[in-house]
Amino acid sequence: MDKKTAICFILALFLLGGLIFSLGSSGINRGLIRSAEAEQVKLSEVTRDIESKSSSIMGNLKSEPELFSQRNLSTEWPKQVEQSQSLLIEAGREVTSAMALIEKNDPKDESQIRVHLSKAQSLRDRAQRTVTEIQQTSDKWVTYKKNYNKKLLESKGIYDKIIGASFVDLESQIQKAVTDWPKKKQFLEDRLSAVKATVDRAKQNWENSASYRSKTASELTPADFEKMIALGNALNTDYRNITGTQNSLPKLIDQLYWSWDKTLIDMEIKEGYEVDFYLTYRISRTKYVPVTVNESGEANTGPPAETKSDTSVSKVNSSTYKKMEKHIGMVVEHKPAGKFDKEAERTIQPPGYAYMCPPEQKRNKYGYWQTRSNGTSFWVFYGQYALMRDMLWGRSYSNWVEPRSYRDYSRSRSLGRTYYGTDSSNKPRFGKGGSFTSSRYQGSKYVKSGGYKSSQYVKSGGSYKGSKYTTRSRSSSSSRSSSYTGRSRSSFGSSSSRSSFGSSRSRSSSFGGSRFGGGK
């Protein structure tokens, strides 16, 4: 009996066994029986797939014998295909062994059944992977030879685009960025050098291929074909790298000119079928504009810095909600100008403080310390950054940040602590219950609800998990309650019970639970 006949014979036994074993009693887990039957089906499908691909491979070997014979592939590939067919037969034996144990219907054999099915799957995957790789390679080589002239023209076209790539605009952007942000000089210049080196490498590869590019398709050896395919792949990769850098590097440079702050502006607890928790963030972005100061200390007047603002809502678990609650109204991420987005600081801090400088420094690129008539000082943002100030502090901004506050903030940061500040009443200014938070976000759901103190979740100390049977009316609640008590516990765990009552999603809708979809 040849191997193909043996495979067909084994699969026929599998399918017959599957019909018998599917009728088995409750001894063996039915899910495991279904897994075995599924493996039978999959093995049958893979067998047909390998037979089809084997025919394709043999057809390619016969159509282009010289293309494959010089590398011994005419004998090596059929040998690998035969080995793969042997793996299928071995996989079939593993499934047969699993089915024999299933027929015994002894739950003690379940672990051994799983071992047999796991081995069968591994053998099947190896066989299919090997034959698929051979078929794809042989198809690629035959197709390349048939379309050699077209492929050569395509490679020449990609090469021309590579050597024609211009970096003038990119060099100009990098030069300006390096002047504005010297710390990024090495990174930006390295990226530019790398993309230029890609062009040089492509030129060298093209020149090295001249000896076999000059041949006709019929003159090419298998080694030549392999080199030509590799050349085409390399040129495509180089071109993608070049265009990718031309597109991505200006975007990275642009990031340097923007600062942004991610502020936690609202929180929400929704109680329905389950208790759900949501955090609302606002991302405030400000584009850096140079501000020059004259000898008198007066800043130049100019157009306001460009600003952008958007919000996002994230559904979180209860532990994250509790952790973040004390930080409401505060900045949870800050990205200063001169850094990339991936370098953003994830330190909880009051809004606006990251843009200030130590009082001894007097001023920076965003503002300065101004002295009152009584000798005290306060922080003032330059007019160009008034919109940023309004986004972070609101239009009711007053000059309340004094040197002592900034020093306390700096000291807390150096000690790894979160600074919540103090107001004139010696109470926290920022975070949960902070005077700034209560004023700045008085319209938020969190502040309006008093921190959701009246919610079942908060009143229960976090033990309330929501109600799976929340109802819209007393009457419907009564009728449903009676219908539940009429069902046995076993009926709730059965598939028919799940079908009757629906999934958790449908139950949420039926019984009045509400859900709010928000994404970051």
Image: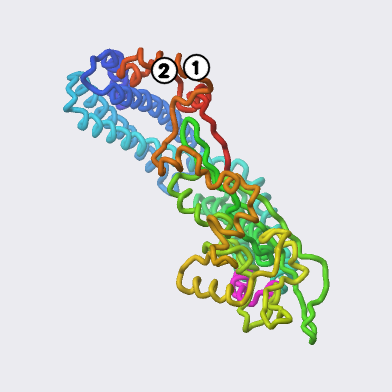
- From the image, tell me which residue sits under label 2: 481
Q: Position of residue 301 (x, y in %)?
A: 83, 73
From where the camera sits, is residue 324 visible?
Answer: yes
Residue pushed farthest front? 425
Name the residue type under label 1: Ser
Q: Label 1 belongs to which residue?
A: 476
Q: Is residue 511 left or right of residue 254?
A: left
In the depicted structure, whether residue 31 falls above or below residue 139? above
- Residue displayed at 34% across by 18% down: 494
- Which is nearer the N-term, disc 2 or disc 1? 1
Question: Quick check: is 479 in the magenta stretch?
Answer: no
Which span is picked out in magenta?
Answer: 177-192
Q: Nearer the viewer, residue 182 or 171?
A: 182
Mark 1 nearby-residue class (10 Å; few <14, some 14–19, many ≥20): few
Residue at the image position 60 percent from the left and 45 percent from the top: 448
Location of residue 20 by image quarter? top left
